[in-house]
Amino acid sequence: MTSGSGPGRRSILLGTALSVTCLVTGCGFLRGDPRPSPVPAPPSPDELAAGRAARTARALLAAGVSFTAPPPRLTTALRQLTGGHREHLAALGLPEPETSASASAAGGSSAAGGSSGPGAKTSPAPAAPSAARAAAASLAASEWAGAKEALADVSITTPATAGLLARIAAARAVHADLIRAAAGLAPLGDLVPPAPPAPATASGSAPADGSAPADGSAPAGGSRSGTDATSPSPTGPSLEAADETALTSLLAGEHAAVFAYGLVVARVPAAREKLARSFWQDHRRRRDELERRLATAGRVPAAAEPAYDLGALPTTPAGVAALAVRVEEGLAAAAFGAVAGAEGEGEVREEAAADLVRAARRAATWRGGPVPLPGGPASGRA
């Protein structure tokens, strides 16, 4: 039998060569046990949280631009809302969805009454009030849920990501307020319910009814003289140094806010006095809570300063509102710093994020509109 030189012989030679090579290199595919491919590293908590934030931002942006024929009062609110979500996507390092630009342009021309050029389509008529209110309530609920989602990720991410998520959560909560107000709906409650107030002490606290001095000046010492000089004994969990610094910063902001709101309450127009008193009570409650948190950890809470520089005293309603905005934006900035400075996966960071949300909502109430990312330079911190 001749060996031949056809395809069969070449196959035998190739098989022999492969066998020899596998003896040297250990080829496993011929035995059916391929070497495992390198397993990619799982995404980090930051990457997962940023992905959730981006998906929700895109969904909320799409919901805003697709709002059909909004009534005039909602048009501005929707424009502010969609602009905010675009800012959030940019802050997350992601491009705006391609479809949103065209949809926004179409929605903007519709809200403005449509084009008057040749061949222009007729703008849709505004939706019936009941239908528009229902759609606005649904959109506000989505924003509210998005705020809660971002807040839930604050404690599991690194400081930089946690700070951004807290600001995004604050903006979404403000969006919910804005949409509901434009639709004539009552505001929602607290995104993170505060701790129940403790019984009042006799250490020079502000009047129980939140009244202001008759001369219109701010109460001396932030409306109370501060805490006892003796060092309290620890009765609760200890604090890490970073958490103590964060809580102390928040307390300093609340001391200043309590002082400033004494003047705001005294000079605000009658129509907004109830609102101002409510916010004043909120600040006093949070101040007391922060003092208790520090005291139970064995720390001496810092007392309020005798007075705070509020600048020129406001003489007009607009000036009073501007002062309140500065106070709240200063608190939002302090809360943002506390989020970034507190220990991760702890209550203090979550508390600071909730403070940022509350301050942003109060500032937007006084300002009459939102900022894309509260708590940072873009919001005009005081």
Image (cartoon, grey):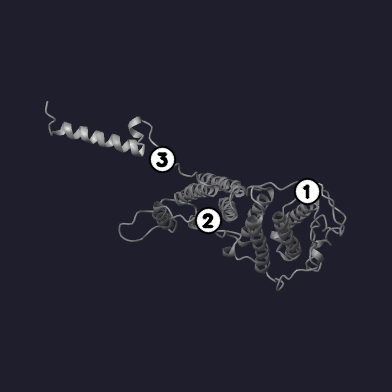
- For the residues labelled 3 and 2, say whether their Cβ atoms are less than 8 Å apart: no
Assess disc 3: are there few (<14), some (14-19) or many (≥20) residues with their C-alpha within 10 Å of its C-alpha. Answer: few
Q: Circle 3 is placed at which residue position?
A: 37
Q: Evaluate whether residue 376 shows in this view.
A: yes
Task: Look at label 1 and name its amino acid.
Answer: Pro
Query: Percent position (x, y) of residue 354?
Result: 65, 51
Task: Look at label 2 and name its amino acid.
Answer: Ala
Secondary structure found at label 2 = helix
Query: Percent position (x, y) of residue 34?
Result: 38, 35
| Dot placed on the residue nearer the N-terminal end, 1 or 2 | 2
Dot in front, 3 or 1: 3
* Front residue of 7 and 184: 7
* Front residue of 179 and 3: 3
Figure quadrant of residue 341: bottom right
Q: Circle 2 is placed at which residue position?
A: 77
Secondary structure found at label 1 = loop
Query: Percent position (x, y) of residue 105?
Result: 40, 57
Q: Quadrant of the C terminus?
A: bottom right
| Dot placed on the residue nearer the N-terminal end, 3 or 1 | 3
| Dot placed on the residue nearer the N-terminal end, 3 or 2 | 3
Dot in front, 1 or 2: 1
Q: Quadrant of the N terminus?
A: top left
Figure quadrant of residue 277: bottom right
Q: Circle 1 is placed at which residue position?
A: 197
* Circle on res. 145: none
Dot in front, 3 or 2: 3
Task: Look at label 3 and name its amino acid.
Answer: Ser
